Amino acid sequence: MPASVSRRNGRVSEAIVHRIKKQITDGRLLAGHKLPAEREMARQFKTSRVSVREAYRSLEEVGVLRIRRGADGGAFVVQLDHQPVRRSLALVLGLGRTSHQELTEARMLIEPPIARLAAVRARKEDVVRLERVLVQEERETARLSGPFRPTASQFHRSLAECTRNLPLVVLMNAIADLTAEAAAALDIMTRTRHRQMNTQFHRQLFEAISAHDGDAAYAIMAKHVGDIQARVRRSLARRP
């Protein structure tokens, strides 16, 4: 194939990829939607089936499409899953041996603005979901039964979902994974108090978010993060 033809096919393929991604972002293409056959898409773009095939394969490689063969086959939009991205980010940060100071800085820069945005954007169903998580956490704290599990509460993760901003959700989850590891540094005597303090802050955060008070949510989250990180720092200092 001549180089000029190859470059032209590449440009058309990129245009098809961009169009499909935009339709997914805009909500016009949903998970499970079957895209036009290669012949039909080539007709729409006035190009060859080769360009369409390249575009579909490119989107399949990044996990946007699933291509099935056979009579009932075709190119289908998949349900996007951000969990692998979150795990990869947490792994990269963890392998980098993130220091306590670095984690504190990151949390102070990231979590208060997320809380503010959550308060501004939270819909009724978001508030209901967040309250469900909080009530479960409060019940567990009241019973004080079972082992201490820093990740048992999904409050911070659920709070991030209120922002309706996928990058922030992924970032919060990765930070929460690192925070859970750091909280393991707490000594046994501190853990019960740690859980109680967290639950109190979470109730304040919930009230601010349900009231759509962004400034209050920001201030409470900043105080909450500072309190957690100070407790962890003290526990680390007591280690032999």
Image (cartoon, rainbow, N blue to C red):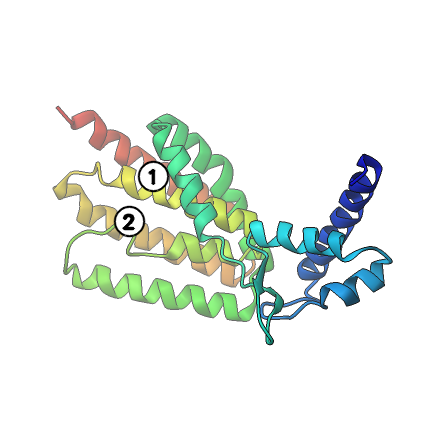
Residue plotted at (43% across, 42% down): 88
Q: Position of residue 110 (x, y in %)?
A: 50, 40
Earlier residue among tags 1 and 2: 2
- Depicted 143 relative to depicted 55: above or below: below
For the question of whether residue 216 can be seen, the reply is no
The front one of 1 and 78 is: 1
Which amino acid is tagged 1?
Asp
On the image, which quarter does residue 144 sit in? bottom left
| Residue of label 1 | 227
Q: Residue at x 15, y 54 (%)?
A: 147
Q: Secondary structure at mark 1?
A: helix
* 33, above or below 7, in the image: below
Looking at the picture, how far across and down is residue 36, in whole percent? 72, 68
Where 108 falls versus 192 (above or below)?
Answer: above
Position of the N terminus by quadrant: top right
How many neighbours does mark 2 have within 10 angstroms: few (below 14), some (14-19), or many (20 or more)?
some
Whether residues under marks 1 and 2 lie with C-beta atoms below 8 angstroms apart, the answer is yes
Q: Quick one: 10 or 30, which is closer to the camera?
A: 10
Question: In which image quadrant can residue 23 be found?
Answer: bottom right
Query: Does residue 25 appear in this view?
Result: yes
Mark 1 to mark 2: distance in Å? Answer: 9 Å
Residue 95 vertical position relative to residue 30 in the rendered view, above or below: above
Q: Amino acid at mark 2?
A: Met
Residue picked out by circle 2: 197
Q: Residue 152 in the image: state x and y as whole percent.
A: 28, 56
